[in-house]
Image: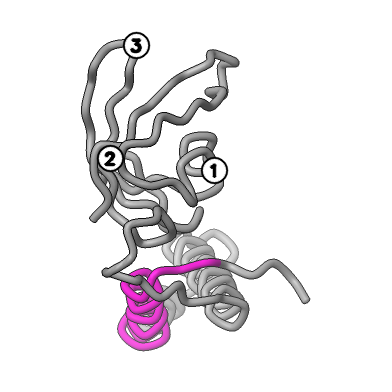
């Protein structure tokens, strides 16, 4: 079996919605663009036709990618009563070297997005805090090789 993708329920639903949109609206729009481009005549030097074909290839590739992810995914159930850090948990940590506090959610690598405060369970920080509880201080090596200590302030 290929990789198993760990997804939160929200991440799974988001991918399913994207797949539905690609198979429905996006495919239809692309077919219309192809029809219009074909109607222009000579396809050998038709930039609109080439662009529509490229878009069609992109849509079909993304559909296959999402179908593979959904087929090989494991939905991580959140245990709201547990105070142990795991997938789907929101965590408040304090970086001890500069007393900076931040809050983020631990998610699978496909859902990770630092701008949305979603940290991968496979990142150095994610790996270090998984299985820990409130009050614990954990150390990890950043990707630059720096040793970083964080204190777990809260687990939600």
Callout 3 secondary element: loop
Q: Separation of disc 2 and disc 1 at Cα?
A: 19 Å
Work out whether 89 lies above or below 75.
Answer: above
**Lower position in the chain sequence, tag 2 or tag 3:** 3
Q: In this orientation, which residue lies closer to the viewer: 53 or 8?
A: 8
Q: Is residue 130 magenta?
A: no
Disc 3 to disc 1, C-alpha distance: 19 Å
User: Looking at the rendering, which quadrant does residue 21 occupy?
Assistant: bottom left
Q: Which residues are magenta?
A: 6-30
Residue sitting at 29 percent across and 34 percent down? 93
Q: Quadrant of the C terminus?
A: bottom left
Residue ID for mark 2: 115
* Vertical position of residue 120 compared to residue 26: above or below: above
Q: Is the image coloured rainbow, by chain, by secondary structure, or in one colour?
A: one colour
User: In the rendered image of this protein, does residue 146 appear above or below residue 63?
Assistant: above
Number of numbered discs overlaid on the protein picture: 3
Residue at 64% in and 70% down: 4
Whole-percent x and y of residue 137?
A: 41, 29
Label 1, on which residue?
127
Residue 115, image x, y percentages: 27, 40
Task: Report helix, strand or loop for mark 2.
Answer: helix
Query: Which residue carries the number 3 mark?
Result: 97
**Which residue is at the front of the view, 135 or 11?**
135
Tell me which residue sits at (41%, 50%) in the image.
112
């Amino acid at each position: 079996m290929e990789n198993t993708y760990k997804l939160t329920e929200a991440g799974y639903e988001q991918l399913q919605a994207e797949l539905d949109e690609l198979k429905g609206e996006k495919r239809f729009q692309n077919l219309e663009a192809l029809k219009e481009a074909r109607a222009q005549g000579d396809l050998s030097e038709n930039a609109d036709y080439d662009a529509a074909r490229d878009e069609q290839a992109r849509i079909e590739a993304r559909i296959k990618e999402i179908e593979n992810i959904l087929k090989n995914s494991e939905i991580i159930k959140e245990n709201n009563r547990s105070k142990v850090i795991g997938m789907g948990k929101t965590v408040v940590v304090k970086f001890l070297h500069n007393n900076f506090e931040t809050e983020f959610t631990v998610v699978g690598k496909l859902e990770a997005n630092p701008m949305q405060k979603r940290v991968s369970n496979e990142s150095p920080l994610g790996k270090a805090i998984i299985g820990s509880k409130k009050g614990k201080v954990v150390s990890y090596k950043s990707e630059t090789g720096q040793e970083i200590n964080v204190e777990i302030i809260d687990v939600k």
